[in-house]
Image (tube, coloured by chain):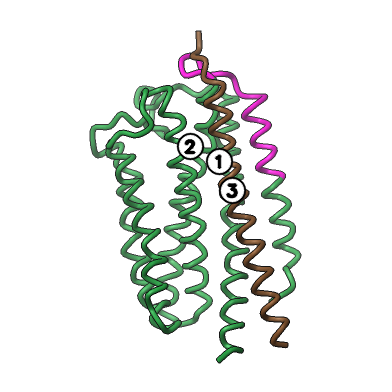
């Protein structure tokens, strides 16, 4: 367990190269949006981070269910790792959205349905760590953590569909037909958009795997200690 | 004429990459600590 697997090293390198490649593509290949100007380029990583965060939380719920069914701690480590990484991606999405909003909406934050549900989702998953730290045994941490991850996952579709269910000023990025979307993306914009989604998904897998190794190492150390 | 939001773009990418870098750094430190503790007990 202490030696890093070759596949993970390869994934580390691929993620880093992918991130740099996507950044280069966004900065030098995509056109400047006609109204918003250069700040619109933050959109590619903003959406990709939000996507990776939501995917992490879904993964955490699946892993939580895996623990409740099998009672194997490896599922708990996966659930914990996915939530930690998801919170990091959620934070990136919120901060980058605020920076994008300031010149476009003339404010850092509004209590819009999408922003509010995203903040609630982030707070719910941040509280997961407080819950775990208050429990004494690995079994209770894993069991309650799994239940919390499954219930918490309800915030993911709520956040995703909030811009379709409620009146909002947040743009709909993925829309059928041109009328509902924030702006019509040119082919080069679409390339950068989908590249960012793929790169952040790779990054998500890489970070979760690394965090999983840490959880496994800690569990082994605690076992030796007792 | 597009709005002049170049500085906001730089701030956006700086924040995104900084948060990612800080998290990766925290992972590296925590894994190194866990490995150290593990090898001490051996």
For chain A, give the colour.
green
Q: Which chain is brown?
A: B
Above or below A85: residue A32: above
Instruction: Decide: few, some or many residues near mark 2? Use Cα within 10 Å; few <14, some 14-19, many ≥20.
Output: many
Query: Relative to A91, is A19 on the left or the right?
Result: right
Percent of width and height locating residue A67: 44, 76
Percent of width and height locating residue A115: 33, 40
Read off the residue under disc 1.
Answer: B16
Q: Give the CA distance from mark 2 to mark 3.
A: 12 Å
Residue situated in front as seen by the camera: A179 or B38: B38
Quarter of image, res A191: top right
Magenta span includes A24: yes
Quarter of image, res B13: top right
Q: Give the CA distance from mark 1 to mark 3.
A: 6 Å
Instruction: Decide: few, some or many residues near mark 1? Use Cα within 10 Å; few <14, some 14-19, many ≥20.
Output: many
Percent of width and height locating residue B30: 62, 66
Read off the residue under disc 2.
Answer: A96
Region of the chain picked out in magenta, as a range? A17-37
Read off the residue under disc 3.
Answer: B20
Please say if the residues under marks 2 and 1 sit with CB atoms less than 8 Å apart: yes
Circle 2 SS class: helix
């Amino acid at each position: 367990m202490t030696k890093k697997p070759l596949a993970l090293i390869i994934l580390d390198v691929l993620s880093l190269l992918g991130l740099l490649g996507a950044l280069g593509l966004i900065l030098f290949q995509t056109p400047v949006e006609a109204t918003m100007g250069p700040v619109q380029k933050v959109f590619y990583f903003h959406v990709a981070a939000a996507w990776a965060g939501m995917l992490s939380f879904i993964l955490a719920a699946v892993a939580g269910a895996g623990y409740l069914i099998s009672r194997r701690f490896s599922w708990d480590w996966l659930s914990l790792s996915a939530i930690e990484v998801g919170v990091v991606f959620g934070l990136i999405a919120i901060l980058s959205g605020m920076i994008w909003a300031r010149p476009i909406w003339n404010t850092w934050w509004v209590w819009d349905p999408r922003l509010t549900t995203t903040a609630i989702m982030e707070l719910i998953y941040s509280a997961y760590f407080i819950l775990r730290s208050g429990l004494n045994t690995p079994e209770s941490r894993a069991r309650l953590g799994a239940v919390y991850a499954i219930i918490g996952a309800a915030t993911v579709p709520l956040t995703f569909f909030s811009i379709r269910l409620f009146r909002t000023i947040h743009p709909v990025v993925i829309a059928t037909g041109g009328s509902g979307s924030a702006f019509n993306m040119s082919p080069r914009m679409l390339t950068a958009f989908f590249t960012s989604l793929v790169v952040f998904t790779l990054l998500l897998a890489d970070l979760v795997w690394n965090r999983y190794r840490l959880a496994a190492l800690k569990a082994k150390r605690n076992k030796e200690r007792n | 004429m597009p709005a002049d939001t170049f500085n906001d773009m730089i701030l956006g990418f700086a924040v995104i990459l900084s948060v990612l870098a800080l998290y990766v750094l925290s992972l590296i430190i925590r894994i190194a600590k866990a490995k150290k503790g593990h090898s001490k007990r051996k």
